[in-house]
Amino acid sequence: MIVVRGAGDLASGVIHRLNRCGFDVVCLEVEKPLAIRRNVSFSEAVYEGEFSVEGVCAKLCNNIEEIKKAIKDKNVALVVDEKGEYIKYLKPDIVIDCILAKKNLGTNKDMAKLTIALGPGFCAGKDVDIVIETMRGHNLGKIINSGYALKNTSTPGVINGIGKERVGYAKESGIIENIASIGSVVKKDEVLAYIINKDNEKIDVKANIDGVLRGIIRNKSNIVKGLKILDIDPRIEEVSNCYTISDKARCIAGSVLEEVVRFYNK
């Protein structure tokens, strides 16, 4: 059994790959996930009860028996468990931290025989056994046996020469009310959502560029100022990308699978 902490879009690439290769996967999520690329995030099962990504289904489970049933049916089992309490009951061979919080929220080497973490905030060989590089570029997916991944730059990856403008952040705290849907073709300065602040004022959330709305945080979510809430792909012809696992997630998933296979082949 493999436990994956987190079920956002990058985590879902890892979960999808492991499930397709025949591994029993249980993923742990927070009570109210805030994934942006929701169409390719198993975390949506928290709200929907079940959710499929590219032919793999995650089932929301409330206890050990439901987890066993989901796995027996070749599905991914998903549990709301922010602190990782289920790990001590399940006793998995492998724990993979895919939370991508840019810091360690409690994962440690004592949790399993093999521990893997994605991105910055972990020291390979100390906090966990293996760290996987998540920064786009030549070293994306690099397997790190000692030391840290590159530090977070807070700069989105460049697509068609456009970087930071692709991503939208909350200008105020409040409740988001979405107008546009994932997959919509949007224009610069078009209002995509509103944020209802504590004074019940509506704050416009506008597109910074023309493109396809690849992701937007779930409607009615409670958000805080500065939170990343949407992602626009400037390639209008790439609407189908909204519904498929990204190249970045597939690359990272391949590196995770490599370490999992090496572990079981020792």
Image: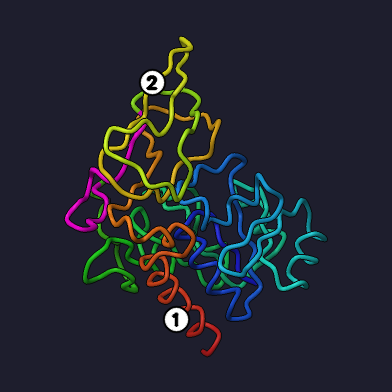
Q: Which residues are magenta?
A: 155-170
Q: Residues within 10 Å of mark 1 (few under 14, many from 20)?
A: few
Q: In percent of the image, x 71 and y 50: which residue is there?
A: 49
Q: Main secondary structure of the magenta part?
A: loop
Position in image of residue 55 (x %, y %): 61, 70
Q: In percent of the image, x 66 and y 61: which residue is there?
A: 58
Is 156 part of what is drawn in magenta?
yes
What sort of colour scheme is used for the picture? rainbow
Left of 40 or right of it: where is 76? right
Question: Is 178 situated above or below 105?
Answer: above
Q: Earlier in the sequence, mark 1 or mark 2?
A: 2
Q: In percent of the image, x 66 and y 64: which residue is there?
A: 57
Residue beneath disc 1: 258
Left of 226 or right of it: where is 199? right
**Tags 1 and 2 touching, CB below 8 Å:** no
Question: Is 156 situated above or below 174?
Answer: below
Query: Which disc number belongs to residue 203?
Result: 2
Type of the residue with mark 1? Glu
Position in image of residue 110 (x %, y %): 54, 63
